[in-house]
Image (spheres, rainbow, N blue to C red):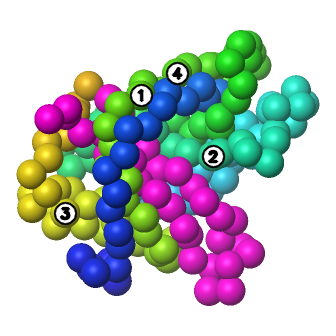
Amino acid sequence: MVSKDSFTVDIKLVPELQVAYIPHGGPYKGDTGLFERLFERLFAWAGARNLLQPETKALAVYYADPEVTDESQLSMSVCITVPEGTEAGDSVDVMTLPDGTYAIAHFEIDQDEYEAAWNALYGLWLPESGYQPDNYRAPFELYLNDPREHPQHKHIVDIYLPLESR
């Protein structure tokens, strides 16, 4: 269970990130198979171009609030970091995630606790933080491990919540 004491939050200025991505429109909540398929395609594309390096990061960017957006209108992208100058191709696009101030919430959760983690960040931490979300930049999840290799199959993830400048 995700509680106020089960995660930490740091406020950091984050540099822009160059990413290759595959977009998805429509329902995604709880569909681990969807994420696996999209990441498989993305990693295969990157592997064929020798873009997978030890420092490559995997993330998912979310463009709409699932609490207020109809499931059919949701949109997100699975991404990996790539070197600047990487060209798009084969249904994989390239974009830059903007720099700025982010709340970075660190979680160690079960596969079915992602929604609870987001709810804890937005519902428990944000109201007491004194910060306002920056709705012009998209939040994202940065995946820090392969849960299949974790002894309890935990997902270690940082949720990046963009914040307005103070």
Badge 1 density bin: few <14, some 14–19, many ≥20, Cα 10 Å: few
Q: Amino acid at mark 4?
A: Thr
Residue where numbered disc 1 is placed:
99
Q: Which label sits on residue 111? A: none
- Tell me, yes or no, whether the highlighted magenta stretch contains residue 18: no
Lower sequence index among marks 1 and 2: 2
CB under 8 Å between discs 3 and 4: no
- Tell me, yes or no, whether the highlighted magenta stretch contains residue 165: yes
Q: Residue at x 24, y 76 (%)?
A: 4
Tell me the mark number nearer the camera, choosing from 3 and 2: 3
Alpha-carbon span between mark 3 and mark 2: 25 Å
Residue 59: horizontal and vertical position, in percent? 56, 45
Badge 3 density bin: few <14, some 14–19, many ≥20, Cα 10 Å: some
Residue 82: horizontal and vertical position, in percent? 70, 29
Tell me the mark number nearer the camera, choosing from 1 and 3: 1
Q: Amino acid at mark 2?
A: Ala
Visible residue check, residue 32: yes
Q: Residue at x 14, y 47 (%)?
A: 131
Residue where numbered disc 3 is placed:
125
| Camera-nearest residue between 53 and 24 | 53
CB under 8 Å between discs 1 and 3: no
Q: Tell me the quarter of the picture where residue 70 sits.
A: top left
Lower sequence index among marks 3 and 2: 2
Q: Which label sits on residue 58? A: 2
Residue 69: horizontal and vertical position, in percent? 23, 40
